[in-house]
Image (tube, rainbow, N blue to C red):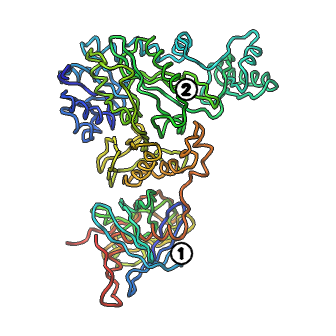
Amino acid sequence: MAYVFEAAGRRHDVVASKSADGVVLEIDGEVHSIDLRSFGDGEHTVRLNSVARRAWIAARGDTVFVQIDGEVWTVRRVDASSAAAGEGDAANIAKAPMPGTVVSVAVSPDEPVTKGQTLMVIESMKLQSAVAAWRDGAVAEVHLNEGDTFERDAPLVSLAPAEQ
Amino acid sequence: MAAFGKVLIANRGEIAVRIAQTLRTIGIGSVAVYHADEAEALHVRTADEACEIFGETPVAAYLDIGGILEAARASGVGAVHPGYGLLAENAEFARACDEAGLTFIGPEPEVIDLMGGKVRAREFAAAHDVPVLPSATGQDGFVESAAGLGFPLVIKAAAGGGGKGMHIVRDRDGLEAAVEAAQREGARYFGNDTVYAERYLDRPRHIEVQVLGDRHGNVVHLFERECSIQRRFQKLIEEAPAPGLSADLRVSICDAAVRLARAAGYSNAGTVEFILGPDGDFYFLEMNTRLQVEHPVTEMVTGLDLVAEQVRIAAGEALGYGQDDISQTGHAIECRICAEDADQDFLPATGDVLLLRPPAGPGIRFDNGLRRDQAVGTAFDPMLAKLIAHGADRSQAIARAHAALADLVLLGVTVNSGYLRRVLAHPAFRAGTVHTHFLDEARADLARPDWDDTLAATVLGAAALSSRDIRAALESVPEPHASIGAWRN
């Protein structure tokens, strides 16, 4: 699975997978063995290859705050699929991870979609990314048209609430 | 001591919490005031009682004299502690308290007025043998009288501000041109071509003296503090004692402060601020007629509780000790924790306090008004908390502050704790050779650690693996082997 993160003013492509030794993260093409342990209340140890360090982690929306060695790094998810990671009402709406433009719209209201299906293609910071359906369902609303520009957190596509 | 049954704290944030804590220890009831936006704030919960005050904005509520006096009446307090900022140096408020039959825990309104006017205060200081920066004004022969001050000097437009119409002159040759330029700019920007000249100190240090005066004419000093680590003319790190002052110089500065306070008939805790030149010459800047943000460093080295002293003084008690009874032990450093991005020109930051873990350990004090899930907006000053470290000597105090800044966890809004650590680690700070322009000059040294591959991988790995959806996606992947190093959350 591929993700895009932004931190320290830079963008990083992250691919997560599993191996016999645990989790492998490929960051900008370089492979790292990594492990994260939580001790509750935001306290963690993060092990990169052979070195483990204490880390404090808190997240809100698509932003993760990571404190290591007295410095706090703000990490932002910019891959479109993270927009679906919200909870509650937000679970039905894909929101813009950052300001951008709509490149194309792939679905229309009431259309049934399956998880992973592309709903919309957006462009932010000269990078195109697909807004994919985060679950099976039906499109409730397409909030923007092709060519529209949007701000961060703008609603992009809504799915009808999942049936209980 | 129960001179007042209850005291109203006309403030908010960390200082309101800190005052309420002392009131409790000396057996006096406390009443907080709050705007509706802060109904759940820590200062409201720390005080014994709380009264809502009203205003179009939260700050307007805390500045509304009538509203605060109404709260004082409603809660039946005998005195009001103004804290710092807000109404603390408002003579009108002090008078209004008096007229309402309340004791204002501060100096007399006349003294607030005297020290509140920059020119008045400066003339008063000069008249009482407290050095002020040599300056020259007037039209006839201005250039000659300015040159007589010595160089470098600064020419300022009298009506100016914000650096406009200000010219630093290093020698006689550049003087006429600078005077003309300042006159031109004064006329253009401020409609007034009056200029004045003042001696200019390169790389000055900010040294201030804590004084205490009672209502019986006793005045003592509680030694000096150094506050040279500043950004935008606001202090970030303060310490006591000031490193590297000779014994003679320390005595001269402290005596000057006491002389000024005594001449003014000062009663309350107060601070006389000076700038100190590289040659050991010092000059009066201003007097703050209130408790100072950085008062904890003085408390840590003297063992006195300044809020308790303020209350005793306001109640009419005599100090009960003399200068010789006051001594300093060890060294203390305060770091102001501010919601700002120190790496983006100290831009104020907003957010929510998602995670809060106060630092602890020997000699560590953490004054704050924070609670988890609190929203940090732009309505108030960006200072959220103060971390104070005391040690047997300066290097131990620095080491403790440095460690405690890393122990402090405050996530969800950008704060300057990492930056403060970098300042504490800087060789010039460790050597005690900083001045008020230090943060600007050392900007490159104080940048964040390099975002190298290892750091990026560690931070991104932590962020990725703590994201619920990424973890869920990884867990749903068929496992290549039966046993996999699991993570817990």
A69 left or right of B180? left
Which of the two discs, 1 and 2, sits closer to the camera?
2
- Amino acid on which the number 2 mark rests in the picture: Leu
The subunit letter for the residue under badge 2 reads B
User: The N terminus of chain B lies in which quarter of the figure?
Assistant: top left
Q: Residue at x 58, y 22 (%)?
A: B283
Q: Is residue B450 above or below residue B254?
A: below
Pick whichever, B213 or B176, lies toward us. B213
Q: Which residue is mark 1?
A: A28
Labelled disc at residue A77: none
Name the spot of residue B483 as percent of width and height, x first.
30, 87
Dot 2 lies on which element? helix
Compared with B144, B166 (above or below) is below
Looking at the picture, tell me which residue is in the foreground, B252 or A16: B252
Residue sitting farthest toward the bottom: B481
- Please name the residue that numbered disc 2 is placed on: B249
Where is residue B139 drawn, in percent x and y?
72, 11
Residue sitting at x 69%, y 23%: B155
Q: Is residue A63 shown to the viewer in this render?
A: no
Name the residue located 41 percent from the left edge and 59 percent from the top edge: A67
Q: CA distance from mark 1 to mark 2?
A: 58 Å
| Amino acid beneath label 1 | Asp
